[in-house]
Image: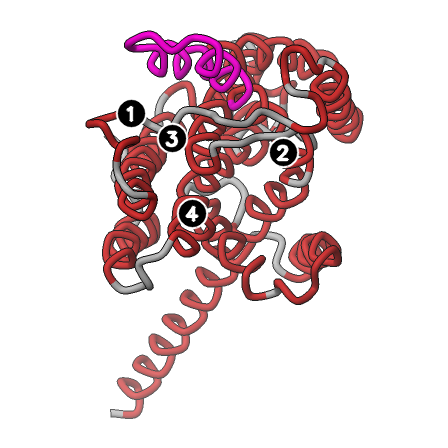
């Protein structure tokens, strides 16, 4: 069994410890919970899902936010119209299965397209989905979106005060994010994960080694879409309202999370989610210009730190350790 690297352990466990302590330090209001802490959890899941597809398998996607949108709408439409006992559990299953099926359709594009052409196709899919959601007012609420989405009813949480509900929802989301991060780590270090990475490095070489390239592309598209769909449910529980515009704006934000943290690593998306979870609040004064900042961040990272902040940290750590070793060796030679 492959052991988790020290960097991964430090990032995951360190983030978990801080995340557990934070709710007891920050002001006990709905702003911190609903706007910063809970989004960090589903952003982590969403970024890990894109990282699995793009970072580990090399399949470019510019419309991955659409799967989160499909998951959120599948859950919300079902739960708004059906309110029997266990309806939320059925809605949750739908939010995972429906994006998984759509992910398989994108897998068909992955098997025939590559690089920028695949990115264009996934981006076009996201735009087509937005147009459909706005046009079908009878089903989706149109441009106004869906309102009155039922709150999470686990342990009668929906009967609590808003700040109490948000705190319990936060710990549920945090636990879900932790479990999914560990599952992703186990997956990428399994035989299936090694096949993903072989496809990323060279589809020709992977096929020559006997790897079913098309089959694995279908699989990773389905898994990553299902993860994004689950994140959509947490998003719906957080806001109790969804619209097509909300998810449309997540596209470049999601890509920024994955790229700035470090693609092709498990800790990278976590770092990206932390940065992108707080950055909008720190730069709130920029208003509509915030997406320009995301674009600039992607350009700067690609130009100067292509391995993301995690890669930059590892490079700095190796440099410092190497410097100390050289100093120690020089001192030993002098003696």
Q: Of the residues tagged 3 and 4, which is closer to the observer?
A: 4
Element at badge 3? helix
Within 10 angstroms of label 4, few (less than 14), some, or many (20 or more) residues?
many
**First in residue order: circle 1 vs circle 2:** 1
Image marks 3 and 1: residues in contact by CB distance under 8 Å: no
Does residue 300 sit above or below 217 in this rendering?
below
**First in residue order: circle 3 vs circle 1:** 1
Residue located at (41% from left, 24% from top): 150
Q: Decide which of 192, 206 is in the foreground and name it.
A: 192
**First in residue order: circle 2 vs circle 3:** 3
Q: What's the distance in space between the residues labelled 1 and 2, CA to CA? A: 24 Å
Element at badge 4? helix
Residue 247's disc number: 2
What residue is disc 3 on? 184
What residue is disc 4 on? 34
Instruction: State which quarter of the image contains the N terminus.
Output: top left
Does residue 36 sit above or below 320 in this rendering?
above
Does residue 168 sit above or below 88 in this rendering?
below
- Residue 316 in the magenta stretch? The answer is no
Element at badge 2? helix
Residue located at (54% from left, 27% from top): 147
The percent position of residue 203, horizontal first and vertical second, equals 63, 20
Q: What's the distance in space between the residues labelled 1 and 4, CA to CA? A: 17 Å
**First in residue order: circle 1 vs circle 4:** 4
Within 10 angstroms of label 2, few (less than 14), some, or many (20 or more) residues?
many
- Residue 81 in the magenta stretch? The answer is yes
The percent position of residue 296, horizontal first and vertical second, equals 73, 58
Does residue 298 sit above or below 97 in this rendering?
below
Residue 153's disc number: 1
| Region rendered in magenta | 72-96
Residue located at (64% from left, 9% from top): 105
């Amino acid at each position: 069994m492959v052991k988790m690297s020290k960097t991964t352990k430090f990032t995951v466990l360190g983030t978990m410890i801080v995340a557990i302590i934070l709710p007891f330090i920050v002001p006990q209001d709905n702003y911190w919970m609903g706007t910063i802490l809970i989004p960090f959890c589903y952003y982590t899941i969403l970024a890990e899902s894109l990282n699995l597809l793009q970072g580990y398998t090399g399949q470019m996607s510019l419309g991955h936010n659409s799967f989160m949108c499909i998951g959120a709408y599948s859950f919300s439409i079902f739960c708004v119209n059906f309110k029997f006992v266990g309806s939320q559990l059925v809605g949750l299953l739908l939010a995972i299965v429906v994006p998984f099926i759509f992910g398989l359709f994108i897998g068909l594009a992955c098997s025939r397209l590559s690089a920028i052409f695949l990115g264009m196709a996934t981006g076009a899919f996201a735009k087509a989905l937005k147009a459909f959601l706005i046009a079908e007012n009878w089903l989706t609420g149109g441009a106004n979106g869906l309102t009155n989405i039922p709150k999470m009813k686990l342990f009668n949480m929906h009967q609590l005060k808003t700040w109490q509900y948000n705190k319990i929802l936060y710990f549920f989301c945090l636990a879900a994010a932790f479990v999914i991060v560990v599952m992703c780590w186990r997956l990428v270090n399994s035989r299936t994960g090694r096949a993903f990475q072989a496809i990323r490095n060279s589809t020709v070489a992977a096929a020559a080694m006997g790897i079913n390239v098309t089959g694995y592309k279908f699989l990773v598209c389905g898994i990553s879409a299902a993860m994004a769909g689950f994140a959509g449910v947490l998003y719906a529980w957080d806001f109790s309202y969804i619209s097509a515009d909300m998810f449309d704006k997540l596209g470049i934000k999601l890509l920024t999370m994955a790229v700035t943290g470090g693609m092709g690593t498990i800790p990278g998306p976590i770092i990206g989610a932390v940065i992108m979870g707080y950055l909008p609040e720190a730069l709130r004064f920029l208003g509509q210009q915030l997406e320009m900042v995301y674009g600039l961040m992607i350009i700067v990272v690609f130009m100067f730190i292509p391995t993301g902040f995690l890669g930059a940290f590892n490079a700095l750590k190796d440099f410092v350790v190497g410097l100390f070793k050289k100093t120690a060796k020089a001192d030993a030679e002098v003696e």
